Image: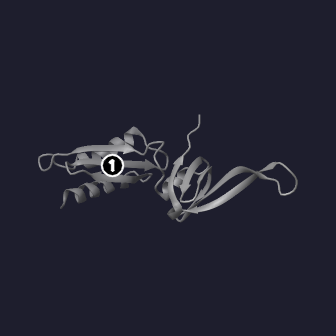
Amino acid sequence: MVFKDKVKALLEEGLKEHPSLFLIDFSISPDYKISVVIDGDNGVTLQDCIDVSRSIEHNLDREEQDFSLEVASAGASSPLQQPRQYKKNIGRKIEVTTENEKIEATLIDANEEAISVEWKTREPKKIGKGKETVVKVAEIPYLSIKKAVVVISF
């Protein structure tokens, strides 16, 4: 079995033991540095990273192939990549960049094909002078999203 396939199988087995965790990124460099990025429906704890790391490391033989291993959680400023990440962030403010625009809005729904966002904007009144606050809602397909990140406010 190829080294990468063996590591991938061990990683999948480790994630099966923790159903709330899911894989964001997995790579092995030419010098055998294994890099795993995970996320979780309820966040990721240090213990989660340790458990996934052990499920890989304890089943590989360094005598066969020397390697280094890094298991990390998706950072707070990391772009959202999977529908599961969007679903866990419903109700939070996100910044979505599409080909045509950049929107800062509240994520109100997410399914397997698209997200729904809601935001307020000031627009000219239809009658009379001045502006009024208008609530806008948009459905954005994942294929249209170039980048989406959770906006962290203090």
Camera-side residue of 125 and 92: 125
Of the residues shown, which amino acid type is indicated by label 1? Answer: Val
Q: Secondary structure at mark 1?
A: strand
User: As drawn, is 52 to the left or to the right of 67?
Assistant: right
Query: Residue 147: horizontal and vertical position, in percent?
Result: 50, 53
Q: Residue at x 88, y 53 (%)?
A: 128
Which residue of the protein is positioned furthest toward the left in this rendering? Answer: 63
Q: Quadrant of residue 97?
A: bottom right
Q: Residues within 10 Å of mark 1 (few under 14, many from 20)?
A: many
Q: Residue at x 58, y 56 (%)?
A: 101
Along the line of sight, the residue nearer the viewer: 98 or 18:
98
- Residue 97 appears left or right of 36: right
At which x and y percent is residue 35?
Answer: 30, 47
Name the quadrant of the C terminus: top right
**Quick one: which residue is furthest to the front in this view?**
129
Find disc 1 in the rendering and name its residue: 36
